[in-house]
Image (cartoon, rainbow, N blue to C red):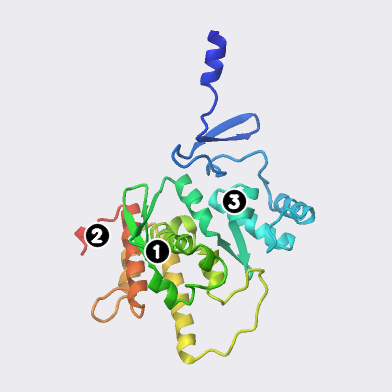
Amino acid sequence: METVKNAAETLPRASDTVVAHAGTSAVARVGAEHGAVAVMPRTAISGLVPQTLDDVYRLATAIAKSGLAPQAMKTPEQITVAILTGLELGLKPMFALNKIAVVNGRPTLWGDGIPALLWSRGFDIREWFDGEDIAMCEVTRPNGAKVVRSFTVDDAKAAGLWGKQGPWKQYPKRMLAMRARAFAARDGAADVLGGLYVAEEVIEGGSLSAEGNSEPFKRKSSAAAKRDGTDAKFNELRGLIANCSDPSELLMLRENNSDADGNPWEGMPMRWNEMLEDDFRLRASDIGLDLEGVE
């Protein structure tokens, strides 16, 4: 009886994911309130995870031939990109295939994959509705910093999404919640997402096709061309902030992108300016930069 008891005590709980490799095991605690998800600890490699680029491509080829890949991933190359992106995020290959979409040759993350990824990194996510028309999402970082974002029916109408045939017509509240979640995750966990776009936003935006094929674009107005340039600058700045580990370099980054009056993030629309400032302050907190002493 004592032997049975001791053996039972060594079994992993249902809220733990066990990752085994070369006769050893590592337990990745994900959180009982969310259940176990297929996320690898960044220090452990599963026996089913490819070890080299050749292994990844062979696995991708096998998956492509088996017909088990998502419909949008038609080639081993697309599957390889999805697997490699997943490995960088700490996701197992098959889980990554179901949560990562290759859109016009670029990896993106499906909205319902965001919670699994953030929970595995110690983040907390809280979602709710303020009335009937406003979806809210709060992302709390491991250090306690919080970012709250919303997406409203008016936002959806302005974007041409409200009442659109498909999930926006069938599940409008869920789509509002997913958009609020995407905003909160991008603003509060840019370092975890690594610059990945949310697939639904890219596809619904109309500029890219879900199958990854290039589509002819209409001639853009000068305003649209200017906006594209602003988009590129915005994404570049977010990446620089997320990857900055030196406090003095982070301060210099903001200073170099301030206008003549000292306002940060020159030339950015108001909402993007706020997002960049949130990114900046979150990154400052992560690397131990005391902003009260320099502002």
Report the amino acid beneath label 2.
Leu
Query: Where residue 136 sits: x, y (%)?
Result: 36, 60
Report the amino acid beneath label 3.
Leu
> Residue 104 has which mark?
none
Quarter of the image with the C terminus in it: bottom left
Task: Say few, some or many: other residues with alpha carbon within 10 Å of mark 3 (under 14 / 14 to 19 / 20 or more).
Answer: some
Query: Where residue 143 sits: x, y (%)?
Result: 33, 48
Report the amino acid beneath label 1.
Ile
Task: Say few, some or many: other residues with alpha carbon within 10 Å of mark 1 (under 14 / 14 to 19 / 20 or more).
Answer: many
Quarter of the image with the N terminus in it: top right
Query: Where residue 212 sits: x, y (%)?
Result: 66, 70
Q: Tags 1 and 3 in contact by the CB under 8 Å rule?
A: no
Judging depth in this view, the residue of 251 and 286 nearest the camera is 286
- Distance between mark 1 and mark 3 Cα atoms: 22 Å
**Mark 2 or mark 3: whose residue is earlier in sequence:** 3
Viewer-nearest of discs 1 and 3: 3
Say which residue label 2 marks: 291
Total marks shown come to 3
Q: In which quadrant of the rendered view does residue 239 lie?
A: bottom left
Query: Where residue 230 sits: x, y (%)?
Result: 43, 79
> Residue 87 has which mark?
3
Say which residue label 1 marks: 241
